[in-house]
Amino acid sequence: MKIKMKSNQLYSLLKIYSIILILFLTFLSIAVGMLLHENNKKIALQSIQNTTGRFEFLINKNQDKVAEVGVELTSTSEKIASIQDYFDLTYSEYLTKVLEINYKKNWYYYLPKTIENLYYRDSSLLSTSMTLKNFPEIYYSQKTNTMGNKVMQLPKTEVFRFSTPLLNKDTLQTLGSFHMDFEKESFDQIILNQNSPYPIQTLVFSVNDQLIYEGSNKRIDSTISKKINEQMEQNSTVELDQLSTSYYIAESLTKNNQKIVTIIPHKAIIESTIKSTISLFLLSLVFDGLLLMILFNLFKKYVDQVEDILLTVDQISVGASKNRISVHNKKAETKQLAEGINRMLDSIQNYIKDIYELEIKQKDADMRALQSQINPHFLYNTLEYIRMSAVSEGAEELADVVFQFATLLRNNISHEKVVTVENELKFCEKYIFLYQMRYPDQVAYRFKVCDDAKETLIPKFAIQPLIENYFAHGIDFTRNENAISVKAYNEKGKTKIVISDNGIGIEKEKLAQLNQSLIQTDSFKPDSVGIMNVFTRMKLFYGNQFKMEITETKGGGTTVMMEF
């Protein structure tokens, strides 16, 4: 009944963990969603800023082209006169006059040819036009008619027009204006090149706040144009503050004070974030659901086998000493555990029989001997079971820790008094390894043993207390750069062992007292028992040949040098 209750408690605990996991995933998804939203917002702002900047660059570039052409067209009085002749005369009269001037003055300027050259210089140019004061006609040329002709009205086309005044540099009077029309596609391409997952819309306004360009990488949102037109009708200006509540906005002004506005709706960022967050949550939920199903299945098998083991153990504890755990329905670690417990019970039975046959005076001593034999055996079996369980669950790191810990215990219990330097350092390495597993990002170590020092004999535990001192008193767990190194080598016929660390070190006064106590052993302090124990044992083993010195490590920490 107790076992069944424990099993139900374990299942209830696993269910609680499942609920906690779902709640954790929910909060994690919300946190990730907030981070995604901020990241998406940054991407959106970067996209509209890049788009606005490139629009500004291209508009300024084209405006500079138009201004340069306007200056070139009116750079001399002869060119101005030729342009006026073109508007004042018929085409045949103008051509005749150009040829006469060329014949008389050996100077040639032909307006249609000059305009035609502009198309060769810029492939994105669609058309040009020119107006002069006091002339109703307009000079107009396009790609299909690069020489152009005079018209009364310009055709309606979807172009991006740039204008510049034509000035007489001598009189500084405005003669008229010159216009160059460029493809809108080149501006649309700027938006498309952003490869943004969000709808980007760019609007360009003239100096008079007239909408002269509107483009988008998605379907154009006509509501924005409608709002702007309403503002124009009411206030004759564009106020973007009202749009900032629904859109992310980037603004810029060109050299000619044309306003560029690029926007992305808030709603698009929110929708993208929600979709990503929901997808992540569902994916995590499915993955964790499968993991929980697998864990439930494995857990049930283990619970059934462990229940059987506990039931038998309970029966034995109430007097059924001849009962044994059935192993035919056990697998892997539980089978090994059951067999180990059965062997232990058999051994206990034999020991009990022997104890009853001993004399009363020997009973206590024999019981202690029996306990010393049983406890390590049971401990090692239990540790091995834990290790194998960890391996089967894929917890390689936990299995390694258990193995190293078991090895450390075996070394502590073993009875040899003298070991080689190599074996002593292997034991120390396991000791440090367990600390490193507890603080994986805070402890580093390095052992270096030269071949000529590996087989040198020293008393067991001659190095381990010095390393233990570092972890007990010298390490600083508030930082991540803790390190300890051990080097063993031969130099001039003597073996040297150097233990160095970069810990908090020893105060200079205390360090001096400690070195003095190594010379006068009757003056050592109680808090240096470990060091004095090592010193005394090595001194007894090697005699006066042994020396120990403790110094401050360069850069901070402590260095212990032993020489024999």
Image: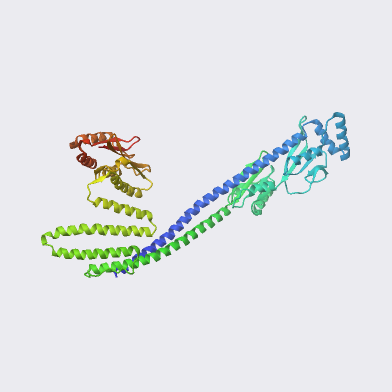
Residue 52 sits in which quadrant?
A: top right
**Quadrant including the N terminus:** bottom left
The image shows residue 193, relative to residue 378, as above or below, that is above
Front residue (pair 162, 353):
353
Residue 319 sits in which quadrant?
A: bottom left
Q: Is residue 382 visible?
A: yes
Q: Residue at x 27, y 58 (%)?
A: 379
* Count of labels in the image: 0
* Colouring chosen for the image of the structure: rainbow
The image shows residue 249, relative to residue 394, as above or below, that is above
Residue 394 spot, x, y in % from top left: 39, 58
Q: Is residue 235 visible?
A: no
Report the side of 102 relative to 51 (left or right). right
Report the side of 273 relative to 191 (left or right). left
Residue 195 spot, x, y in % from top left: 61, 50
Residue 168 spot, x, y in % from top left: 77, 32
Q: Residue at x 85, y 32 (%)?
A: 102
Front residue (pair 166, 538):
538
Q: Residue at x 70, y 39 (%)?
A: 63
Front residue (pair 99, 16):
99
Front residue (pair 61, 441):
441
Residue 299 spot, x, y in % from top left: 37, 64
**Quadrant including the C terminus:** top left
Residue 424 sits in which quadrant?
A: top left
The image shows residue 556, relative to residue 12, as above or below, that is above
